Image: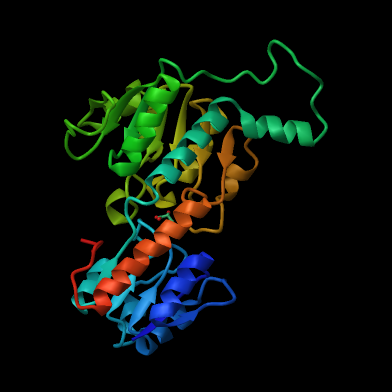
Amino acid sequence: MRILVTRRWPEAVEKALAYKFDVTFNSDDKPLSKNDLAAAMGEFDVLCPTVSDIIDAGVIASGERVRLIANYGVGFDHIDIAAAKAKGIAVSNTPGVLTDATADLALTLMLMATRRAGEGERELRAGRWTGWGPTHMVGSALKDKVLGCVGFGRIGQATAARAHHGFGMKVGYYARREMPQAIEVDGTFYPDLEQLLAVSDVVSLHIPGGPETANLIDAAALAAMKRGSYLINTARGGVLDHEALAEALRSGQLAGAGLDVYPAEPQVPECLLGLENVVLLPHLGSANAETREAMGMRALANVEAFAAGKSLPDPVA
Ligand code: DGY
């Protein structure tokens, strides 16, 4: 069984995988081109891609050999699942193991945006800081404010738990259905997105990417948010209209935003780069050593199950 791993993985995982299987690693660690991915479909039995590999219907149609796509990551909107299914190719992901890291990063962005941390750092490094002052770079407190989670799966719930227990925020959430026993957070369920947006001081996005959620947070949704509120996105860039966000940040409709993901990474929407009140991180949600290793081990578990003819631990619907 030949396996292609499209990017470098943590050393321990690469070793574990190579010990058991015939693996080709992309030693350059640069995202593979569409042509490379297409060629791989005919040369390997298992493909282990990441979010930086666009595996669309064209790529999937290009070869007959791949039987499993074991994604390194929980989100899979970069893979055309319907096309894979139609060809009988199994797809797996790595749920659960990156929940804490991503929720931590959502809180990082929340604190950075509301306390103007990026702006303050830029001021200091540019030599523009003139000293402490009662009105200098004053932000906004989180305690007693309402966090509105759009999407309330594992990461949304872990973010809410941190915001509530750690920072005294109240929690509301918008999801397809009410989650009566979600977590140890007393969150209020809003079946209507606009209603949640209207009562939230900080809105945090935790929905999957893909056609169903594309531009869910558009100009109308941003206008429905409380004036002077904040928006955090650790989900996928495609769920947000960035031109509309830039306008809302310029006009003061939003006081600030914190983003970790963008529609066409590694490009960052130009309209945001000159704005002081937005924190921009380079897709770091799962980026701590423990999590990245756990993600690899989870992908490996799926490859092992596949090789043994067992059902996958993490099949993608
Ligand atoms: C994920 O796992 O979905 C992260 O965004 C990295 O791909």
Q: Can residue 220 be seen at all in this image of the molecule? A: no
Please give left or right for residue 132 compared with residue 149 in the image: right
Residue 213 vertical placement versus 94 (above, below): above
Give the quadrant of the C terminus. bottom left
Q: Residue at x 35, y 42 (%)?
A: 155
Please give left or right for residue 64 compared with residue 249 in the image: left
Q: Please provide percent x and percent y for residue 241.
A: 43, 45
Q: Residue at x 36, y 89 (%)?
A: 42
Q: Please provide percent x and percent y for residue 192.
A: 22, 31
Q: Can residue 245 be seen at all in this image of the molecule? A: yes
Please give left or right for residue 151 compared with residue 85 in the image: right
Q: What is the number of callouts on the image?
A: 0
The one of 290 and 95 positioned closer to us in this rendering: 290
Picture quadrant where residue 182 is located: top left
Give the quadrant of the N terminus. bottom left
The one of 78 and 194 positioned closer to us in this rendering: 78
Residue 76 vertical placement versus 65 (above, below): above
Q: Please provide percent x and percent y for residue 10.
A: 51, 64
Q: Residue at x 28, y 31 (%)?
A: 173
Quadrant of the picture in which ligand 1 is shown: bottom left
Q: Please provide percent x and percent y for residue 8.
A: 53, 70
The one of 290 and 201 positioned closer to us in this rendering: 290
Q: Residue at x 20, y 31 (%)?
A: 191
Picture quadrant where residue 194 is located: top left
